[in-house]
Image: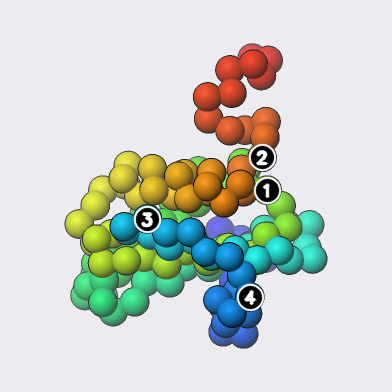
Amino acid sequence: MKRAYRLARSEDFQRIRRTGRSWSRPMLVLQTLRNDLAHSRVGLVVGRRVGTAVVRNRVRRLLRESVRLRWQDIEPGWDIVLIARTPAAQTDFWQVKAALDSLLERASLLQASHTPGNESAPR
């Protein structure tokens, strides 16, 4: 993911945690807050509780790839933080992607023309 689309500063994560909204699934938490930019930014949090360094890096890769595949469908102008929970260590890519899709849909962060199952769009 390009640097401009990443959240990296601790202050940004704290601001989103303090004033943003949150949705959760057993393996993933999604926190959001409106930003004043023309694009959205994403930050990942995978704590030590999830597992060893190898496991945490694998979970990060799964999350990054899931976000990459959905990036064009995400509404612009949002700061998004994804927090991995312990069960994420035992899941595969498809389960992580399904959890992310579900959370994005619940948070209404998917653009209307790109929502899954929208068959009325021209081909």
How far from the left and from the top, in percent, is residue 112? 67, 35
Q: Residue at 61% across / 70% down in the picture?
A: 20
Q: Residue at 68% across / 48% down in the picture?
A: 75
| Residue named by callout 4 | 19
Amino acid type assigned to the residue bearing label 4 in the image: Thr
Q: Earlier in the sequence, mark 3 or mark 2?
A: 3
Q: Quadrant of the N terminus?
A: bottom right
| Residue named by callout 2 | 111
Amino acid type assigned to the residue bearing label 2 in the image: Gln
Compared with 66, 28 (above or below) is below
Marks 2 and 1 close (CB-CB < 8 Å): yes
Secondary structure under the numbered disc 4 in the rendered image: helix
Number of numbered discs overlaid on the protein picture: 4
How far from the left and from the top, in percent, is residue 23? 48, 59
Marks 1 and 4 close (CB-CB < 8 Å): no
* Label 4 to label 3: alpha-carbon separation: 20 Å
Q: Earlier in the sequence, mark 4 or mark 3?
A: 4
| Residue named by callout 3 | 25
* Label 4 to label 2: alpha-carbon separation: 23 Å
* Label 1 to label 3: alpha-carbon separation: 21 Å
Residue 24 found in image quarter: bottom left
Secondary structure under the numbered disc 1 in the rendered image: loop
Between label 1 and label 4, give the one nearer the viewer.
4
| Residue named by callout 1 | 75
How far from the left and from the top, in percent, is residue 116? 53, 30
* Label 2 to label 1: alpha-carbon separation: 5 Å
Marks 3 and 2 close (CB-CB < 8 Å): no
Q: Earlier in the sequence, mark 2 or mark 1?
A: 1
Compared with 76, 10 (above or below) is below
